[in-house]
Image: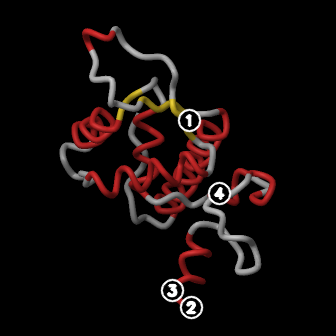
Amino acid sequence: MQRECDEQRAFGREQDEPDDGVISLAKKHTIESYLPLTPALFHVLLALADGEKHGYVISKEIARRTDNEVRLSTGTLYGIIKRLLDDEMIEESDERPDFSLDDQRRRYYRLTKLGKAVAEAEAERMERVLALARLKHVLGPQQA
């Protein structure tokens, strides 16, 4: 029971809410209620910020962009994708590349307006944390 309660809190559900696997925006109330994001979830949103991608490309872009510092396993990636779909931060795209250039089993994803707003809010939150770290001399001054 405790684990179930912990999982419900981790996914933003209260104990008395139905566990239907979907978290509606109406229950969230504000963009900030999604924050803070996990680093892996934020990286997935960033990977989709410049356009539609399928899972393998999302994973490869994250690894490339972070010099392999962040590498998501297939299970982790698709767990995040499921959560983002449930939270309506991403959606599956109906548009596909030419049949001859694509494997039809691939699913392409794109950010929704909510996903973009949450990613922006998380980036702004992180900027405030970094500003505080500079103020406390944990980081040196910001370089231009």
Residue depicted at x 40% and y 35%: 47
Q: Could you tell me which quadrant the C terminus lies in?
A: top left
User: Are there few (<14), some (14-19), or many (20+) residues within 10 Å of tag 3?
Assistant: few
Residue 3, numbered circle: 3
User: Are there few (<14), some (14-19), or many (20+) residues within 10 Å of tag 1?
Assistant: some
How far is disc 1 from disc 2 in space, using C-alphas?
A: 32 Å
Q: Measured along the vertical axis of the image, is residue 134 above or below residue 45?
A: below
Q: Secondary structure at mark 3?
A: helix
Q: Measured along the vertical axis of the image, is residue 12 above or below residue 7?
A: above
Point out residue 30 in the picture as x, y percentages from the top left corner.
76, 53
Among the 4 quarters of the image, the one containing residue 79: bottom left
Q: Is residue 31 left or right of residue 111?
A: right
Q: Which residue is mark 4?
A: 22
Q: Are marks 4 and 1 in contact (CB under 8 Å)?
A: no
Q: Amino acid at mark 1?
A: Glu
Q: Which residue is mark 1?
A: 91
How far is disc 4 from disc 2 in space, using C-alphas?
A: 20 Å
Point out residue 65 in the picture as x, y percentages from the top left corner.
27, 37
Q: Which residue is mark 2?
A: 1
Q: Secondary structure at mark 2?
A: loop
Q: Are marks 3 and 2 in contact (CB under 8 Å)?
A: yes
Q: Are marks 4 and 2 in contact (CB under 8 Å)?
A: no
How far is disc 3 from disc 1 in space, using C-alphas?
A: 29 Å
Which is more N-terminal, label 1 or label 4? 4
Which is more N-terminal, label 3 or label 4? 3
Q: Amino acid at mark 3?
A: Arg
Q: Amino acid at mark 4?
A: Val
Residue depicted at x 47% and y 62%: 133
Q: Secondary structure at mark 1?
A: strand
Q: Residue furthest bottom?
A: 2
